[in-house]
């Protein structure tokens, strides 16, 4: 593991990954999600970008950060979502001299993550087989749409395709409507989460044995992996699961219900909670009905039960249901929009909305999502806002490779950085 330089140490890192350095050749969402998490945990993440184009998502807007004159910058909300705690270095790796620079930087790093298509980095001499003998401890993680093997391996893959092919869209949406993707790029995000876990496991192995390895991750594989109970429902029964809107395949009642003034979530997890709900709804006979007395019976007879519950829930306001059920231990909650979400006292208490300095913004600050991991001894730190394109090129090349300002100027003149 490389030693933390004096300059890096001055950033105030104290996380569990302090001293770990990551070379991030990924873009869009899956890879950047993984490396942002590693950065939050204290790793020094060096994000390599093309000198002109940068990460594609920088231009995936509006909205963008607006400057003091209310002009859009090139920093989109999408890009900001996954690139905190990184240093941006611009290198054109398509040129041999650029690929050589990346190789030199890698010698100072523990981890490489990229999401080039199969064979994409190999043509620059940066494939795993090109590097492993020279850098035997290197943890080398590759994220692609379909993995390094199999009939789809050469194809480009995106979150939307993974959700469709991987089955989650067949489970999402109104029963009588069209299949619906999840509202955020969840296949990308979850692939990034699997990547971060795999990287840390491989890093531990490398630290213990001196042996690095390649990690092959696919959006499609990881999306299929979190089909969870619905996959096993299919395996056990042989029946293809159906879209149920907000209803649960294995628990009833567990869905959204109408109220006098809107909707609320009723999440009954066991028979005792169902009895409490019925008592509170002044319909105790419902829990004693032989059709509904146990969860497996409620699943078989959900078509008869749900309309009866809807008739009851329309008799009170949303607030009356939530307050009353919460007081007796029956899980329930609102269906918030994002304004309501970030005003929620629990979410505010848990610091899930953070503010960071950002000189480009007209206020000098931007808001970002907080990290949900709470350590007792090595807390997550927010050290660097998402970097502007090439913001740290000069610093990193001088710090890690001892390339002087004059030498860097020559590299810029050649279009390498």
Image: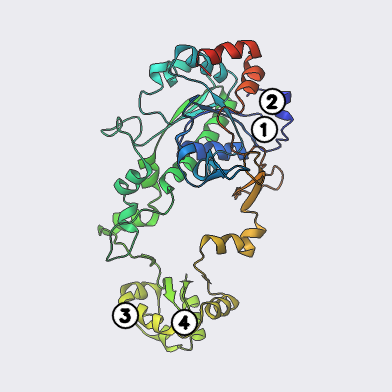
User: Between residues 314 and 79, which one lies in front from this camera angle?
Assistant: 79
Q: Are marks 3 and 2 in contact (CB under 8 Å)?
A: no
Marks 2 and 4, the one that precedes in the sequence: 2
Give whichever of discs 2 and 1 has the lower sequence position.
Answer: 2
Percent position of residue 409, x then y = 60, 13
- Label 3: how many Cα within 10 Å (few below 14, some 14–19, many 20+): few
Q: Residue at x 60, y 20 (%)?
A: 108
Residue depicted at x 30% and y 29%: 154
Mark 1 residue element: loop
Which residue has dot 4 on it?
260
Of the two numbered discs 4 and 1 on the same chain, state the one appearing first in sequence. Answer: 1
Q: Nearer the viewer, mark 2 or mark 4?
A: 4
Where 220 sits versus 178, above or below?
above
Instruction: Tell me which label, 4 or 3, sits earlier in the chain.
Output: 4
Describe the colour scheme in one phrase.
Answer: rainbow
Q: Which mark is residue 18?
A: 1
Instruction: Give the camera-side residue of 65 and 4.
Output: 65
Residue 404: in sight, yes or no?
no
Q: Which residue is mark 3?
A: 304
Using the numbered discs, state the Cα–Cα distance from disc 1 to disc 3 in whole angstroms.
Answer: 57 Å
Callout 4 secondary element: loop
Looking at the picture, tell me which residue is in the foreground, 25 or 15.
Answer: 25
Name the residue beneath numbered marker 2.
4
Residue 155: x %, y % from top left: 30, 33
Are there few (<14), some (14-19), or many (20+) residues within 10 Å of tag 2?
some
In contact (CB < 8 Å): disc 2 and disc 1: yes
For label 2, the SS is loop
**Disc 4 to disc 3, C-alpha distance:** 22 Å
């Amino acid at each position: 593991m490389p030693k933390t330089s004096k300059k890096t140490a001055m950033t105030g890192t104290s996380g569990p990954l302090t001293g770990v350095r990551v070379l991030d050749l990924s873009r869009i969402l899956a890879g950047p999600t993984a490396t942002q998490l590693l950065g939050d945990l204290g790793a020094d993440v060096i994000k390599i970008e093309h000198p002109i184009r940068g990460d594609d998502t920088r231009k995936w807007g509006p909205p963008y950060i607006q400057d003091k004159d209310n002009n859009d910058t090139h920093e989109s909300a999408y890009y900001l979502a996954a690139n905190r705690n990184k240093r941006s270095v611009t290198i054109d790796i398509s040129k041999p001299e650029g690929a050589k620079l990346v190789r030199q930087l890698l010698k100072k790093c523990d981890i490489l993550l990229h999401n080039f298509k199969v064979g994409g980095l190999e043509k620059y001499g940066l494939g795993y087989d090109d590097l492993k003998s020279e850098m035997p401890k290197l943890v080398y993680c590759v994220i692609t749409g379909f993995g390094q093997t199999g009939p789809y391996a050469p194809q480009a893959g995106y979150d939307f395709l993974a959700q469709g092919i991987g089955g989650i869209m067949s489970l999402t949406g109104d029963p009588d409507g069209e299949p619906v993707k999840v509202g955020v790029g969840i296949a990308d995000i979850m692939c990034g989460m699997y990547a971060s876990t795999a990287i840390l496991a491989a890093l531990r192995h490398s630290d213990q044995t001196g042996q690095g390895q390649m990690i092959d991750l696919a959006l499609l594989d990881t999306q299929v992996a979190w089909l969870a109970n619905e996959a096993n429902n299919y395996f056990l029964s042989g029946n293809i699961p159906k879209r149920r809107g907000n209803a649960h395949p294995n628990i009833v009642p567990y869905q959204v219900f109408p109220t006098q003034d809107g909707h609320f979530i009723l999440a009954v997890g066991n028979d005792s909670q169902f009895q409490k709900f019925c008592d509170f709804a002044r319909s105790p006979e419902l829990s004693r009905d032989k059709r509904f007395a146990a969860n497996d019976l409620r699943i078989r007879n959900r078509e008869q039960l749900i309309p009866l519950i809807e008739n009851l829930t329309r008799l009170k306001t949303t607030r009356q249901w939530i307050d009353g059920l919460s007081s007796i231990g029956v899980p329930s909650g609102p269906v918030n929009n994002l304004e309501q979400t970030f005003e929620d006292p629990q979410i505010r208490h848990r610091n899930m909305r953070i503010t960071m300095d950002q000189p480009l913004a007209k206020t000098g600050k931007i808001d970002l999502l907080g990290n949900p991991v709470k350590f007792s001894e090595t807390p997550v730190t927010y050290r660097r806002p998402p970097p502007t394109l090439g913001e740290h090129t000069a610093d990193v090349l001088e710090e890690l490779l001892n390339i002087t300002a004059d030498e860097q100027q020559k590299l810029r003149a050649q279009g390498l950085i």
